[in-house]
Image (cartoon, helix red, strand yellow):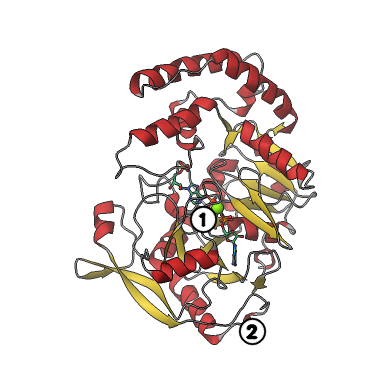
Amino acid sequence: MNNNIVVFGAQWGDEGKGRFVDFLAVRADAVVRFQGGNNAGHTVAVDGKYFKLRLIPSGILYPDVTNVLANGVVFDVKGFFDEVDNLKKDGVPCDNLVVSDRAHVVLPYHFELDGLSEAKRTSGEKIGTTKKGIGPTYMDKMERSGIRVCDFVNKDVFPSLLKRNVDAKNQLIQKVYGGEPFDYQKILEEYSALADRLRPYVKDTVKLLNDMVAAGKKLLFEGAQGALLDIDFGTYPFVTSSHPSSVGVPIGTGIAPNKIDSVVGVVKSYTSRVGAGPFVTELFDETGDFIREKGGEYGTVTGRPRRIGWLDLVVVKHSALISGMDKIALTRMDTLAGVDKIKVCVAYELDGEIIDHYPADLTVLERCKPVYKEFDGWTDDISKVREYKDLPESAKKYIETIEEITGAKISMIGVGPNRDEAVLVKNPYDE
Ligand code: GDP
Ligand code: IMO
Ligand code: MG
């Protein structure tokens, strides 16, 4: 039996992590976000009602599950309360939320700097960030000038830290970017009120989570973004500023690696990407358009159309390797229905040689050509299928190839966005 499970995105994000975290959360005692911030957009659909979660963990619909924003998260206080208020309007009580005292706070100048630095990049350099202040907040953390939640809610500490930061950022904003300075007093007033509201949510989550582990409770770690957006292992610099792969869990929570029992990679049965950066299997034809429109592949956070391509198993294998992925939750098999011939990239051809590892150098990656294996598609509406045996034979062949090449076992298959629209092969908590 597994107690502590990681669910992470094995591609470039938007694989369907939120829906499978929600699906598994019924068995968990806590759902824990360990990195990123409200650059994430996780959709949970229950009986046709859609909840779009950004910062708040996808276990929030279960009142008995503790939902934790751990130390590795960058915490937008305003965004957090907007989300809480919206969820409350939808009848979700949100009484089960805890915020780490060690998480770093996103402040107004971080948003501004995110936008200004993107604007300054040439068109080929633009990352296409979500402009949620993620990069600048992690920069401050690493530079050791960031403001942690425990500092933020401490009335004796926050004003002076904020003053130092606003002064420094105003220099940068005015002198480097030619932008407008921030008013320290205004931010102090607004954010001190937010700090008062936040104080009851703040806990030492390192202790909380380790006590839960010691008591044999079940933790579910919810990745945001995807492994190919990892600052170390992704398509740098076209990445986010954190560790979305399972390597982010120990550092982002204080739970030691040997406490993790299983790692589930969420894999979309094709590939999507928002923002710039390499994408070897990208489709520019009507098949790509068909999948984008059928799947409604537009960003949850920014509304941007997502770039679409065939499933790239070189990418998924890379994610599996760095994350110790032993299981796969495969999503959107229903979206592929109606595509006549489905391709899967099984290797790259690089300057006449076949490789199956993911290169770091983007100029090398640019020369990589996909080597495809082709599958017959399926036309049946599979959204009502709940048992593996009832899937079309061609879909089974597709799934078996994914298992064979990645070496991970399929545990769940999404056949629609709703909580119940899934084929459960084996619940990861039961293995
Ligand atoms: P996340 O960021 O990984 O949580 O994924 P998003 O919520 O941003 O994007 C995934 C989208 O796919 C959402 O609109 C989900 O409702 C939807 N989705 C997830 N799994 C499935 C599936 O198996 N079939 C279909 N049709 N939609 C799915
Ligand atoms: P979820 O959790 C897809 C992308 C942005 C951009 C890059 C850096 O919903 O899967 P950032 O704002 O993080 O500095 O942007 O990362 N990105 C995502 N793409 N899904 C996400 O989250 C993403 N979060 C960030 O588009 O290319
Ligand atoms: Mg998303």
Q: Is residue 394 visible?
A: yes
**In this orientation, which residue lies closer to the viewer: 248 or 91?**
91
**In this orientation, which residue lies closer to the viewer: 79 or 288?**
288
**Whether residue 30 is situated above or below residue 370 in the rendered picture:** above
- In this rendering, would 364 be left or right of 103? left
Place residue 43 in its image quadrant. Answer: bottom right
Element under disc 2: helix
- The residue that appears at 67% across and 37% down in the rendered structure is 82
Q: Is residue 4 visible?
A: no
Element under disc 1: loop
Q: Is mark 2 within 8 Å of ligand 1?
A: no
**In this orientation, which residue lies closer to the viewer: 198 or 327?**
198
Q: What number is the disc on residue 327?
A: none
**Whether residue 135 is situated above or below residue 265 in the rendered picture:** above
| Residue bearing mark 1 | 298
Q: Is mark 1 within 8 Å of ligand 1?
A: no
Quarter of the rendering occupied by the C terminus: bottom right
| Residue bearing mark 2 | 390
Residue type at tag 1: Tyr
The tag earlier along the polypeptide, 2 or 1, is 1
- The residue that appears at 31% across and 43% down in the rendered structure is 123
Pointer 1: residues within 10 angstroms few (<14), some, or many (20+)? some
Image spot of residue 80 (x, y percent): 65, 37
**Whether residue 395 is situated above or below residue 92 in the rendered picture:** below
Quarter of the rendering occupied by the N terminus: bottom right
Image spot of residue 132 (x, y percent): 51, 37
Place residue 113 in its image quadrant. Answer: top left
Alpha carbon of mark 2 to alpha carbon of mark 1: how far? 30 Å
- The residue that appears at 79% across and 49% down in the rendered structure is 63
Image spot of residue 308 (x, y percent): 43, 62
Residue type at tag 2: Asp
